[in-house]
Image (tube, coloured by chain):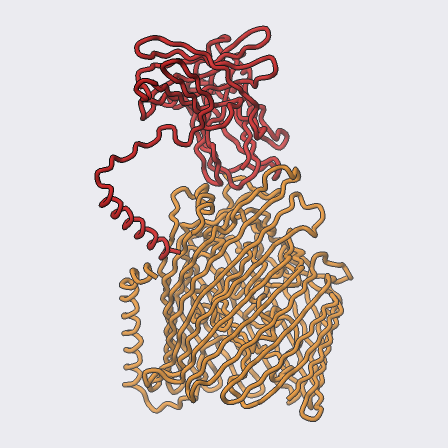
Chain colours: A orange, B red
Amino acid sequence: MKSFIWVSPKLGIPMVCLLVAVLFTAFVSELHGQEVAADSLKLINLNEVVVISAGKQLDHQKQHKPMSSLDEFLESSRSINMVKRGAYAWEPTMNDMGSERLAVTIDGMQIFGACTDKMDPITSYVDVSNLSEAQIGSGQQGSAFGNTIGGGINLKLDKSNFKPTGWTGSLESSYESNNSMRAFGGELNYSDEKFYINTDVIYRKADNYSAGGDREVLYSQFEKYNFSINTAYKLAEDKSVSATLIYDEARDVGYPALTMDVSLARAIIGSVSYNQDTLFGSLTNWESKLYFNTIEHVMDDTTRPGVPIHMDMPGWSDTYGFYSQANFTRERNRFFFKVDGYFNKSIAEMTMYPANSSEALMFMLTWPNVHTTDFGFYAEDNISFSKSSLKLSTRLSYHSNTVADDFGLNSLKIFHPEMDRTNTRFLKSFSAQYHQMMNDFHLNGGISYGERAPSVSEGYGFYLFNSFDNHDYIGDPDLKTESSAEVNLSISYEKPIFEITAEANYFRVFNYIIGTVNPLVSPMAIGADGVKVYENLDYAQLFNTSLLGRYAISNAFKLSGRISYHRGVDNDDENLPLISPVSYQGSLDFYKNQYSASLSVNGAGKQVNYNPAYGETKTASYATLSASFGKRFFLNNDSLFVKTGIENILDTYYSSYTDWKNIPRMGRNIYLTISYSIK
Amino acid sequence: MKTLKYIFAILIISASFLSCSTDNDDEPTPMNPVAGLIKIYEFSEADHTVEIYSEKQVLEVGYNELSIRILDKASNNYISNAEPTWMPMMHMESMSHSGPHSMLRNTENETVYKGHIVFQMAENDTEYWEVALNYNFNGEPMSMAQRVSVVQPVDGFRKTQVFTGADEVRYIMAFVNPKDPQVAINDFQAVLYKMENMMTFPVVENYKVTVDPRMPSMGNHTSPNNEDMVYNAATKMYNGKLSFTMTGYWKINLKLLNASGEVLKGEDITDDNPASSLYFELEF
């Protein structure tokens, strides 16, 4: 708190400049404004919204595979790819950038995984039963959720929002043949105009899956359950309070691509909010939230035979935070303001058990109790013109890391003798996004600049073993702030039955943080090839482009397709790791009289641009074929929905560039989901 | 926590103010010069007593730091003009020999004389160590001999090396610091003596000792940013840096080089050679 107050004079100047700029724009547009039809344009707030809404609407015709994991939902998004280390807890990437470069929040809450090896992206601590949608913003369009380079994802919780529906409930069950995945879910809700309560529970258990050709992938089992409750009460017509609690626990999770599994991954996520329709007369939709979450993650290798040395690697991450946000509309300007802050504690340790049990245990802190404090201010202005709109946004944050544990500080000083205990940064983000409509053409373009602080692993990691490139990683507390300049452009042609969009973006990331080999340091992990220390490259460049099309053949049949190309290189024109090759997807969907069916193809070209220095190999091209069929029945007021499908029909043996160490993906899989919803 | 700390600090400060105001005329109590040390031997004469202190309860094979002071029984004061010298002696069945030792010097407190002895071997049923002490008391030269008990280190780890170098000289190297190793870069200190004859063990100057700590239980990995030990003329010891990346058992592989860089003892660690013949061990 103290240091924040101390730094605020520094914060003040750019903030005032920004406000002046924003207000000036508002004023100018007011002067020149003609009559504006306020809803003539959809605002370009977010690039994409993935509808998840598990039970409440039973809107399953939009979902190829209801009750699939959140990971599969996210993977179906056109902006997100999932890095897989097994069948569970996939890591979302956007614009070919992973966790460190993304801001991922749950209902606006900052949460940070407790695993040093990225085995618990925070998307693994919620389930589809909790969520209504995933809001996705590419690049700085995601900065409303936090400091980011690649983009932001907010997982929005499913709430009844005082709809007068009374008691509702549903039961769902699904089975998948390939790994005998059993899932059971249920929810019970009550909602009226003064009060609502939503509860849901989901349980999943899976055995090992088999890749194409019936080749079993050992250590790919998992078991998890998730329980959530959220409730709200109207204090007055325009005021309400609400509270949320999510409990998520996974046990016995196998990670076939890694050397360790997980015996426990547990999150408790809670929040209370206060909502008021107006504030100071002119601000609207004022929402304030206090939240906390605590994560415990225990890596364990006791079930793996032949490990050279047995080790335990538990980690803990606790976050306390708040935000307060409101809208403000004035003429053609729609403002959104948000102040937010959080405090995170990340600790991880490693204990190795020597073969000779009389020897002392080998202990190290792999995350040295890093305390992160962040306070941010976000503002955006959506300005509507007759045929166009402009969105300006900014985020300004104070960000500080402190190594709270002396043991950990002394450990890191082995590598960085001059390091300070505390590192403070001021992070900035600015973006301008323009949308122009010309008859059936839509033109979207934007430029932006953003910054991010290094992650806990990048700044303070201590001998974190990466099984992909087989190196131990050491953090560097003195890394420079990574920043990115980004341009994006998309053109689409839209007709009622036909739509085609071409889009591209380019990121020039300065001080790009990546691990580089330090030949002077020898590895700790048995069998590791060397040690990499996180460093700033001068810059890196990332380019993503895709072409999307949709065509309604008839009312019942719709055809859609997408092809994308990605490229990422560093300042020496060397390939960056985990960059997608050419990939494509096509699907034919049918929907009529409560019947739905789909046939889809997914594939990727050969991974030509790979980098062996990061453990990558040339992943071969592949294509898989999937189909689904569903029917909804009405029984009095209730409805029953049955959906079945078959994935990877041809039982292809393949892996994609996102598969850690090229572990093969699932072979042929038949699933069946039954949902029953009670009104 | 922070607030608690502040409250605590304020309490202490106010307490000290209070105590100042009440006990204003009190002399500050002098620091006990042997605080933290254990009195292991006491030798009483008619008019004075000799006290021998050590950090450890028992003397061990290897480097032992000892403090000596002499109490004048008449004045009940410890004397500061004793000018003591000492000589450790191992009485073996067929012969006797001494061991490496420093001079006894005054410390910051003039009444405490400090030095170290490196015992090369442990006692047994028939062989034992004795420390002969010569000093002045009231202007008279005095001498005494105290039989001392020397055992192998209780932790069983090798902290002393007695070896013949490639130059056919007999050397004694003993571990001094870190006494309390940390996961950090530790100050590494050792003493190096050579055996000129049974009674004479001069300090070896200006050699160099390379340092390579390893964990044999964890793939024999090493640690970064160690510094080789070089001679420090002021302390007459060898100083370097030793980094430990985790707790556990560490084998500190060493190589002794003479002033012209020739290896006298020890080998490099390679895939085929997991350990040097010159090493120390520790565990924490």
Q: Is residue A8 left or right of residue A408?
A: left
Q: Place residue A667 in its image quadrant.
A: bottom right
- Expressed as whole percent of the image width and height from the top left, the position of residue A83 reads 59, 62
Judged left or right of residue A393, residue A503 is right
Q: Looking at the image, which residue is at 41% across and 42% down?
A: A417
Residue B158 on image: x %, y %: 56, 26
**Residue A497 percent across, percent down from the top left:** 58, 87
Image coords of residue A675 (percent x, y) = 69, 81
Above-or-below relation of A4 to A552: above
Name the residue at the right extreme. Answer: A214
Query: With respect to residue B248, does A482 lie above or below?
Result: below
Using the image, determine if residue A6 lies above or below residue A430. Answer: above
Q: In which quarter of the image is residue B67?
A: top left
Q: For residue A76, say whether it is visible.
A: no
Residue B235 seen in the figure: yes
Residues A6 and A191: in front is A191
- At x 31%, y 12%, the residue is B138
Task: Kindly identify the residue that appears in the image at 49 percent across and 60 percent down.
Answer: A100
The quadrant of the image that shows the N terminus of chain B is bottom left
Nearer to me, A351 or A151: A351
Front residue (pair A119, B31): B31
Q: Name the quadrant containing residue A362.
A: top right
